[in-house]
Structure formats: structure tokens, C-alpha cells
Image (cartoon, rainbow, N blue to C red):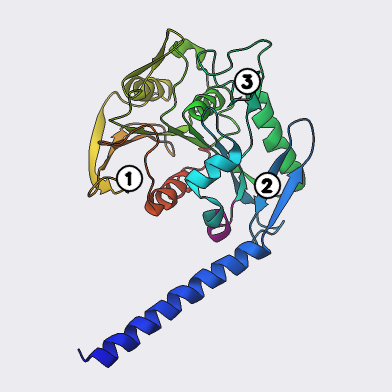
Amino acid sequence: MPQPLKRARFIFALGALLALLASLNTNLANASSQIFPGPRPFSVFVPTSYTSSNPAPLVIALSGYNQSGADFEKYLKLTSLAQVDGFLYVVPDGSKDLHGIRFWNGTPECCDFQSPKVDDAAYIMNIIKQVESTYSVDANRIYIIGHSNGGFLANNLACHYSEQIAAIVNMAGGSYSSQTACKPKSPISVLEVWGTADDTYAINHILGKPIPGALKILKNWAAINQCSTQAITLPTKFDFDSQLPGAETAVVQYQGCPAGTAIDFWRMVGSGHSPALTPNFDQTMISWLFAHPKAL
């Protein structure tokens, strides 16, 4: 191909990319963020496509230990997807302990190490209630994403508020030590995301307490949802960790789950506790959530 033609095509492609980025930035600038005041204020990102006549999904992302909501959003980078895919998005802050460290009281195992205990499950459910009172929320598409300590709280919410939450994503977060503590009223979809190089992959210990790791949590959820005990590895693989070569993530799926629900495992071979996520991870995760509305 002649060099001038190559150069022209490159300039055209670059111009198209810059135009797309400019359009996205303009749309984000036109979007709004509604602050809800109170003892524990939070804000809701509202995409420009939102209309009260078209109920929107609601996604709440829960940060890890010693992270703020802003820190977690810098890691996940979901705001631009909230704009493109049209969902309401909340990234709240956990409480601060006596040392100024933010935490969630996810389960008795993690990570409220002081007294009196904070009822963070009630706090998150109140966020949902407040957002629903102001915006048109699709009641069948309310989703929770949690990382590490936030994953504990995501599992807590799935165990006790399954009638209101459609699905959760637990990224390297534990759950109750006893399966009997988890009593959902209806089946709920669960996606576990863990790196095999994470020392919490098999089992974790916090202050001497044994915490279920990825494999046990998956088996517990499969049993709770009355799926079969059989899990299969799908042929599909993903490149979700930018610091590892190739497609490192295998997809493991439990069979025989109730209609409309799933218990899935993204097994990130060689990844640690907080992998360097690719943009493909964000979109694939949101697509997985949206593919699992509340089973009716």
C-alpha cells in the first residue's frame, strides 16, 4: 500500500478515535451526580440516557479494606460504562475505625474489629431505598459488586436480601464461616472472581478466624441455590489481567441451577488479590450482571 494512503487511513482512524473519546467526555460532562446527605452521605451517578419512564439498573460497588469509594472507582473505572450502558451507579464509603481506616462490617469474620458494630447491610439497603425513592430503578436489576472486605458484605447482602438483589460479584472476598448463617429467601446469581496467586484463594485467616475461600464459597452457593454438584470449565477464556500474558482467566460454571440464575467462577490463573484489570473485565462483568436479572 502506498505510504500516503497508509498515512491517510491512519489519520482518519485517529480522528475517529479522538471524536469518539471527545463524545464520551462530553456525555460524561453532561451526566449528573446526585448527592444524598445524612450521617453517611453518598452520591449516585446518573447517565444522560436516564428517564423516569424507563427504569434503570442500579449497581453498587463496595471497596476493599482501607479504601474509599473514590479509591475503588479509580480501580474499577465503571463510571464511563454507567454512562454508555445507562445504569445508576453508587460507590459508597465504609465507616472509619479509631485509626481512620475504612471498613465494612461484612460478616462477623470481617472487618469490623471494634464495638459497637456497624450495620452496613442495613446501610446499603437504605441506599437502595433512597435511590428508588428518587429515581426509577428496575427492581429486577439491582446488583452488588464487592472486592475483598467489600466482597464479604456483598455475600452478606446476597444471603439476607436475595429477594431484592438480582446478582452479586464477589472479587476475592470471603463469606460466613458457617454455611447455615446464609439463608437467602430466593435463588440469586453469584459470580466469584479470584486469582490463583492470591493467598486467600483457598482459605483466609483474619485474627485467627478461618474464612471460606473461593472453592468453598462456590460449593456453598451451589448448594444453597440447589444447583447440581457438577461444575464444568467452559472453553471460553478471557484476558482480564494486563500484567499477565494471554488469556489467563478460565470460566467455571455450576450446572443445574434454577432457571435464570448462575453460580460462576472466573479463575484468574496467576493473578493476585488486586489484579491490574483490563477494560475488557469491566464490560464483561457488567454484561454478566445484566444477563442475570432477578429470577421470577
Range shown magenta: 82-87
Question: Between disc 1 and disc 2, whose residue precedes?
Answer: 2
Instruction: Locate residue 167, reporting x and y percent.
Output: 50, 36
The number of discs equals: 3
Q: CA distance from mark 1 to mark 2?
A: 28 Å
Q: Are marks 1 and 2 in contact (CB under 8 Å)?
A: no
What is the crowding at mark 2: few (fewer than 14 residues within 10 Å), some, or many (at least 20)?
many
205 with respect to 113 (left or right): left
Q: CA distance from mark 1 to mark 3?
A: 33 Å
Against 3, residue 180 (above or below) is above
Does the magenta portion include 86? yes
In this figure, which residue is indicated by the disc labeled 1? Answer: 241
In this figure, which residue is indicated by the disc labeled 2? Answer: 44
Does the magenta portion include 233? no
Query: In this orientation, does residue 142 appear?
Result: no
228 with respect to 292 (left or right): left
Q: CA distance from mark 3 to mark 2?
A: 28 Å
Q: Nearer the viewer, mark 1 or mark 2?
A: 1
In this figure, which residue is indicated by the disc labeled 3? Answer: 99
Label 3: element kind? loop
**Residue drawn at (50%, 26%) of the image:** 149
Residue farthest toward the front in the current orientation of the protein:
99
Instruction: Locate residue 155, reporting x and y percent.
Output: 50, 25
Say which amino acid is labelled 3: His
Q: How would you classify the magenta stretch by its main secondary structure?
A: helix
Label 1: element kind? loop
Say which amino acid is labelled 1: Asp
Closest to the observer: 201 or 214? 201
Closest to the observer: 102 or 51? 102
The N terminus lies in quadrant: bottom left
67 with respect to 131 (left or right): left
